[in-house]
Image: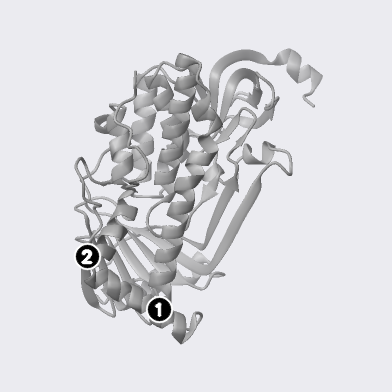
Amino acid sequence: MVDAQRQLDEVRESATVVVIGAGPAGLTVATLLRRCGVDCVVLERRSREHVAQRQRAGIVEARAVRMFESWGLADLVLDGPPHDGILEFRVDGVSHLVDDSGGGEGPGARLCPQQVLVHRLTAAHLADGGDLRHEAADVTLDGLTGQRPVVRYRSADGTPHAITCAFVAGCDGDHGVTRTAVPGGHLTAHTFDHGIGWLTVLADAPPPAHPLLAVSAQGFAAHFPRGPHSSRYYLQCPPGDLPGAWPDDRVWDALRTRLGDPGLAAGPVTDRETFRLRSLVTDPMQYGRLFLVGDAAHIVSPMGGKGMNLALYDADLFARAVRDHVRDGDDTALRTYSERCLRRIWSDQEFSHWLTRTVHDAGDSTDCGPFLHRLARARLDRLFTSPAAVRAFAELMAGVDPAQERPTSTGR
């Protein structure tokens, strides 16, 4: 129940869509909605500075690049060089180059760190007259199964607001309020703990020539570009490790050993954290007028770079569904939103799980045992020698789905 005095003091507003969360998912939803003339309000509990500095994914896959192009936004929101389509696997110090571009016509993937994408989406949304409100506290959702839900929050100055809307887009991540606003029993959470820990390190150090995945008996490691003079590194570690267990000297020693590069140049470490690899899929992704988008609905292990790209896919489907409803009175895409999203989510989860198990089991066999270790090595050998295996791998990396129609225009 909402406090009676708060209701009296509320600033009352209305919008077609309230978007909760201003990460890649929320900002993409809002920017696409503005593009097709649908009004929305974006609420974000963090400050604009905090959101802009979050360091996460770094590659926008080819499918997502084409999606932004179809909305006329690619030049506005994507920055950074094209991914050259080459991924390096380094197994026991031996290099194997794999084409992960997916082939086909049109643009390929782009090296675009999350914070850059967020900055550019924010600018594009505001330039188009968007309504973006940071430091929105105490967000609550009421009437989700009715025709006009109400989203309440307190602004940075403490003023209570109540926004009546047609739809709520829950884009506030795994720990946000939107998924927990759904009563128990209406959503099923499918979860999986991979039993693997990673240390992730951001450093001012030279990027690799190609994104690099390294497999060795000492454990998995990876090296990815994050700009012309910046790199992100990953190191397999015990799931319970804390960042303090990995001082700089230990980080660089482990990277040089696992990457098979004794001369790897070090640089100032600007960020480090540890986390467990886990996966989550929420089914369905809709409750009444609430639609879950991105990490609010699913978490995927980092292998394959699918997390942010799945969020962009959800955002595109949701924005098009709302457009169809507002413009044509057609609710088909809204009714099938969850089904269509989940088809791709499970496909990407499977690919990410396959790649996660392959590069970890092929390295240190302590946990998996010799049988699974040999199977993983066989999968890598097939990838390095079979053109058909490379094509399938590249399609999955690029986000190509031959069974689904690729959007070509916004229909504005």
Quarter the N terminus occupies:
top right
Residue at image point 41% right, 59% down: 351
Q: Earlier in the sequence, mark 2 or mark 1?
A: 1
Residue behind mark 1: 375
Residue at image point 31% right, 71% down: 214
Quarter the C terminus occupies:
top left
Report if residue 121 is visible in the image.
yes
Instruction: Indicate the quadrant where residue 220 lies.
Output: bottom left
Label 1 element class = helix
Residue 297 vs residue 411, the one in the foreground: 411
Looking at this view, name the residue that lies furthest to the bottom: 370
Instruction: Indicate the quadrant where residue 320 lies.
Output: top left
Residue behind mark 2: 387
Label 2 element class = helix
Instruction: Indicate the quadrant where residue 185 lies.
Output: top right
Residue 92 vs residue 157, the one in the foreground: 92
Report if residue 272 is visible in the image.
no
Residue 288 vs residue 405, the one in the foreground: 405
Instruction: Report x, y in % for residue 49.
Output: 44, 36
Instruction: Report x, y in % for residue 139.
Output: 64, 31
- What's under tag 1, amino acid-wise? Leu
Q: Residues within 10 Å of mark 1 (few under 14, many from 20)?
A: some
Q: Which is in the foreground here, disc 2 or disc 1?
A: 2
Instruction: Report x, y in % for residue 129.
Output: 40, 16
Instruction: Report x, y in % for residue 248.
Output: 38, 69
Q: Residues within 10 Å of mark 2 (few under 14, many from 20)?
A: few
Q: Give the left or right position of residue 49, taking residue 107 as reference.
A: right
Q: Give the left or right position of residue 57, taking residue 278 as reference.
A: left
- What's under tag 2, amino acid-wise? Pro
